[in-house]
Amino acid sequence: MDALTALHNRVSMPRLIGPAPTPEQQEALFQAALRTPDHARLRPWRFLVLEGQGLERLGELFTVSALNRTGDPNAAEVLRAPSLPQRAPMIIIAISSARVHPKVPEIEQDMSCAVAVGNMLVAAHALGLGAVWRTGELAYDPLVREGLGLQAHEKIIAFLYLGQSMTPDRAAPELEPRDFFRRWPES
């Protein structure tokens, strides 16, 4: 698939099944991430790749987090938590690991990490994989961050779920560029 076709037709595919991306597909995804714009070549990101036992351990972290929030071991949120990572055979956790730099503020480094995730989403589509970018409160939870070994200055930018789509490809929504792009100043 050519680049513009992939960019114009990518949609999130939240219902995923196995198998996980092959080693060759993973390498293509990783290379796509590493081509992100990166002011001053700081490489302010790192990625955790989870499959199998890694997904189970992430479910345990999600359960601890939910229990900490609700205080009720029978709360629906707690009972659902272990299954959340099982919604895909692979998750890549994108972590912004900003560096102190006089010309590159932290927000630019966070955006660089986000673009790396966007690159992987488009690459996944081009490879015929299903993918969806998730965050939510678990991405910001201190217990999840600690359990994943994040340092104080690091942030989870995305849980990128990857696999084979359970549903047929759906069409990308039709959007009109003129609704979002304007010449400035207007003549």
Image (cartoon, rainbow, N blue to C red):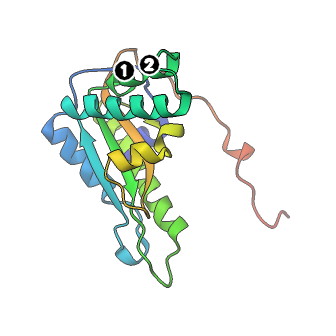
Q: Which mark is residue 83?
A: 1
Q: Which mark is residue 170?
A: none
Residues at discs 2 and 1 in contact (Cβ within 8 Å): yes
Q: Secondary structure at mark 1?
A: helix
Q: Vertically, is 102 above or below 132?
A: below
Residue positioned 44% across, 78% down in the render: 100
Q: Nearer the viewer, residue 130 or 6?
A: 130
Residue positioned 33% across, 30% down in the render: 60
Q: Nearer the viewer, residue 23 or 10?
A: 23
Q: Position of residue 142 (x, y in %)?
A: 46, 48
Q: Position of residue 113 (x, y in %)?
A: 42, 57
Q: Amino acid at mark 1?
A: Ser
Residue farthest left in this picture: 23
In space, the residues marked 2 and 1 are separated at their CA atoms by 6 Å
Residue 49 in sight here: yes
Residue farthest bottom in this picture: 102
Which quadrant would the C terminus be assigned to in this image? bottom right
Q: Position of residue 110 (x, y in %)?
A: 48, 61
Residue 11 in sight here: no
Q: Nearer the viewer, residue 91 or 57?
A: 57
Q: Secondary structure at mark 2?
A: helix
Q: Position of residue 134 (x, y in %)?
A: 47, 36
Q: Which mark is residue 80?
A: 2
Which quadrant would the N terminus be assigned to in this image? top left
Residue positioned 35% across, 74% down in the render: 41
Label 1: few (<14), some (14–19) or many (≥20) C-alpha neighbours in 10 Å? some
Label 2: few (<14), some (14–19) or many (≥20) C-alpha neighbours in 10 Å? some
Does residue 141 appear to the left or right of 16 in the view shown? right
The quadrant where residue 116 appears? bottom left
Q: Amino acid at mark 2?
A: Arg
The quadrant where residue 23 appears? top left
